[in-house]
Image (spheres, rainbow, N blue to C red):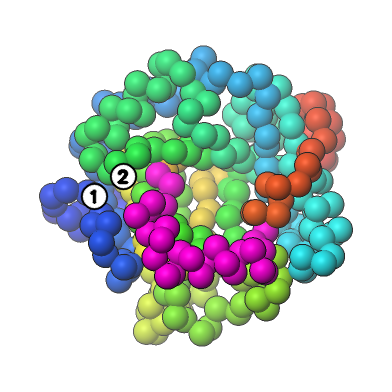
């Protein structure tokens, strides 16, 4: 029996062996039957009621698509910091949910990444029950991804320390395009560029020919109840449905037992010398502008 994505689901435990060095290819699983009764709980009302923060940071996907990543290295981050600031907005939680769910804002492709800890009841219990049924990462789900308007996460990889991160769609749909780490067709940025985990292809779709000519690229269309994981350094591009709100849960994919291994030590040493865009941006005080729905509406025009 095939899943709704056309991929034959595998039976048995969904946990990934922590001793495995990498997955040979992305793994898709259809768990709709196991959690179907819980999926309706991810409603707009439940999101609003469960969110415990006063404010929320929104990524303005349309601005990122138009502007792309500026080239930057650790000695000149001016353009990168300016780009980061103007492609995000801080809003009150209620207004942020309004923007994400209101179809009139879809041209801005609003997107948010929210820690699961930011949600209380009723969603908290629902997320914990999904984790219990699926027996995934022992640390459970860490992040909730929500957006609309066809937001695209550009082609990139997650680095050495992220491996086996499960992404579960609970509402809407997503398309994942994967390219093997060893594929030389993917253009790369120089090692001194802070955005080097992203490809110069940026938001361009993976060429259709790569899916069938032996390149090793794979595509997965996921709907509610379906999930995917992949090995470290696999290139991936993600595009959400442009007609409705899409919500995904994910585990972090970090493996604490690997921290003292040579690979992890080399990664941390490399970050210290060369830097990664996330480490730099998180360590600096970059405050996105506080915006109102009216201000964002003017950007839609």
Image vertical order of residue 18 relative to residue 22, above or below: above
Image vertical order of residue 36 relative to residue 282, above or below: above
Quadrant of residue 248 within the rendered picture: top left
Q: Position of residue 187 (x, y in %)?
A: 60, 79
Foreground residue among 260 and 139 = 260
Element under disc 2: loop
Foreground residue among 213 and 254 = 254
Foreground residue among 117 and 225 = 117
Quadrant of residue 41 within the rendered picture: top left
> In the rendered image, which quarter contains the C terminus?
top right
Q: Position of residue 294 (x, y in %)?
A: 82, 27
Image vertical order of residue 211 relative to residue 83, above or below: below
Position of 100 with respect to 128 (left or right) is right
Residue linked to disc 2: 137
Marks 2 and 1 close (CB-CB < 8 Å): yes
| Separation of marks 2 and 1 at Cα, in angstroms | 6 Å
Q: Which residues are magenta?
A: 251-277
- Label 2 Cα neighbours within 10 Å, binned few <14 / some 14-19 / many ≥20: many
The first of marks 2 and 1 along the sequence is: 1
Position of 183 with respect to 29 (left or right) is right
Label annotation for residue 15: 1
Image vertical order of residue 92 relative to residue 80, above or below: above
Q: Is residue 47 in sight in this rendering?
A: no
Question: Which residue lies at the image location 61% right of the left edge and 77% below the top edge?
Answer: 188
Q: Position of residue 181 (x, y in %)?
A: 45, 75
Q: Main secondary structure of the magenta part?
A: helix
């Amino acid at each position: 029996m095939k899943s709704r994505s056309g991929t034959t689901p595998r039976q048995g435990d969904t946990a990934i062996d922590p001793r495995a060095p990498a997955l040979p290819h992305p793994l898709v699983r259809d768990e709709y039957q196991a959690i179907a009764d819980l999926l309706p709980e991810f409603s707009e009302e439940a999101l609003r009621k469960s969110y415990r923060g006063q404010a929320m940071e929104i990524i303005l996907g349309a601005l990122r698509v138009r502007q792309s990543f500026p080239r930057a290295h650790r000695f000149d981050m001016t353009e990168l910091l300016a780009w980061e600031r103007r492609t995000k907005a801080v809003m009150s939680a209620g207004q942020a949910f309004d923007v994400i769910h209101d179809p009139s804002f879809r041209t801005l492709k609003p997107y948010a990444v929210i820690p699961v800890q930011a949600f209380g009841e009723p969603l908290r219990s629902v997320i914990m029950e999904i984790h219990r049924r699926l027996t995934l990462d022992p640390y459970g789900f860490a992040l909730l991804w929500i957006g609309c308007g066809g937001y695209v996460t550009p082609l990139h990889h997650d680095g050495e320390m992220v491996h086996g991160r499960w992404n579960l769609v609970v509402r809407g749909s997503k398309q994942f395009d994967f390219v093997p780490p060893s594929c030389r067709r993917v253009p790369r940025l120089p090692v001194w560029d802070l955005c080097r985990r992203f490809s110069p292809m940026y938001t361009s779709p993976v060429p259709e020919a790569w899916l069938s000519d032996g390149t090793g690229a794979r595509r997965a269309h996921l709907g509610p109840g379906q999930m995917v994981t992949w090995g470290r350094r696999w290139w991936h591009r993600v595009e959400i449905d442009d007609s409705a709100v899409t919500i995904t849960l994910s585990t972090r994919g970090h493996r604490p037992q690997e921290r003292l291994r040579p690979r992890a030590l080399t990664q941390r040493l490399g970050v210290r010398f060369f830097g990664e865009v996330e480490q730099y941006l998180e360590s600096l005080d970059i405050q996105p502008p506080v915006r109102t729905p009216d201000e964002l509406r003017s950007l839609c025009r």
